[in-house]
Image: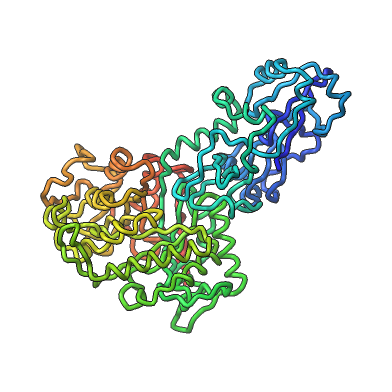
Amino acid sequence: MKNYIWLFLGAAGIFASTQSHAYAYDCTSVPQYVNGSTYATGAIVKNVGNAYRCDVGGWCSTGGPYEPGVGWAAANAWTTLGACTATSSLASSKSSTSSASSLSSISSVSSKSSASSVASSIASSVASSVASSTISSTSNCPSQSEWSATATYTKDMQVVYKGTKYQAKWWTQNEDPSTHSSASDVWINLGPCAASSASSASSKSSASSVSSTTNSTSSKSSSSVSSVTGGHRYVTYAGTWLTSIYDLKTANIPNYITNLHLAFVRPDTTYQKGSYAFDQSVAGFEFAEGASTNNGQRVFSAQQAQDLRNIITALRNRGTQVWISVGGWSYSQGDQWTRFNAPRIVALAQDLGASGVDIDWESSSSACNKLDDANFSCSKDAEIENIITSLYNEIQARGAGLGISIAGWSTGAYYVKGTAFEEGKVQWGSPFGGTLYNLVKRQGSKLTYINLMSYDAGDYYDPREGYLSYRAIYNGPINMGMEIAPEGAGGSVLKINAPAGTVYDADILNGQNNMATQYYNVETLVKYIKNKGQANDGFMLWQLWKQRVNALAPAGAATENTAGQYVCANLPLVGDCSQAIPTLPVAQ
């Protein structure tokens, strides 16, 4: 059901109907916003001459950057209802016949019209048309696109799904509008699509109405949409060892991070739905609250389990999806993957409130035959394909709405004979060459995106060629990976700036195994993805706490903050590019 406001203008009693994003709003009884006060979702306040509705209670209560009409992040927490007017008043939509007959003119008024256009619009219709027409509670959907699980949507974007119109409250992807439209969820149900007898509804979506938009809410929304052209992601893995669940609070996670992957979950987890056993022995996470220690296994308390879920919800509401990452190097070296249990993985993701599952299958014993495309195979093709297929089928069976990503080996799509990626034409000798080729080629449609581990491969590995090897067999988003030095293998050092004279797309696939250090920097990789990649490609960082839990980056190397801030400013990403990951103590 939509809420309509009747705006009375002057003694003539002329009025116009608007939707919740009204041009004017009666603020007579609306309380003044107070920075730092507590506001629940749905609360209405006034500030700097406008009325606002709280969409995300946690942020609305934060103040500062979320102060309505003032803070840079206000649009993520509040919806502008309109400018406060001292002369406006509310009236029932069920006006009496005598009241209707006293009207001299009427017209629908766009919520984004200027004051002058309001006046001219009102003069364009007669009272009788209002008396005979009714305001439909259904939505007209002439120009809304159909919702897609792979598309990204930002605040105020509208879609149609199963005959119903929805509007996004914040950044979202792969969250089914029909199951994510509760008061605390990402989508607003605007009602079923149907032809409306009220011409005012359709006039609001006309091009002329949009082009004449002048209010601050519209300009902020347009800016947000343009800055996420293509839906660039910035995926950051967050190791759980030597960290606390409370390190993940929103104040510590820059808001330009779109996806946070919690690393790692045991492939053979014994997790039971509803148990909230997020400790290392069951789930695999190594948070201090549930770590396996020399003094025994710590177990999450009920409060700590709830706090972790609340933190994940707060991040999602802020616009940062949290995914669980399954596997990793340590959990891939035994036989854990042979006992992969999709129902338990999905149950864990659902209980945490996660948005997706990342498969970081780092099996070191999958050998590939390096033949041509028709005959190419690896010894563990069946294992990894079964992992993805069983996970996908479980998600679909439950209607869980979870995404699936993989961590793609640097050389994981190499060494196919007869292609530009034959061994020797690109980096040779990698034990992981081709290990994901058949998975991506045959099961790629089940993946939301690929995180390319374009690191740990030495000075002769060229991330641009690694990207192209996956792009040759996969049409979805690819996130170019970055690792803060010291790297786990290979000895390469990622830097921010390119050497003088570097051409970002030179020396690619020339049939020679060139040293690639000149191109191993954030500047070159950003330019390449921005100019040669797809519009929905992005970046990935390993990992959020790298220096904190591993070792300091060498002098002149990129850091977690300089790398992320460069990507944010130059790709670009949505958010405050000056935000930084704080230096936190190691959690024991």
Residue 77, placed above or below residue 87? below
Q: Position of residue 457 (x, y in %)?
A: 22, 59
Residue 207, placed above or below residue 301? above
The quarter holding residue 5 reads top right
Quadrant of the frame with the N terminus:
top right
Give the mark count: 0
Q: Name the foreground residue: 248 vs 189.
A: 189
Q: Position of residue 532 (x, y in %)?
A: 28, 40
The quarter holding residue 130 reads top right
In this view, the residue farthest toward the right is 98
Whether residue 65 is visible: no
Q: Position of residue 103 (x, y in %)?
A: 82, 19
The residue at 16%/43% (across/down) is: 507
- Residue 7 is left or right of residue 232, and the answer is right
- Residue 275 is left or right of residue 582, and the answer is right
Residue 97, placed above or below residue 158? above
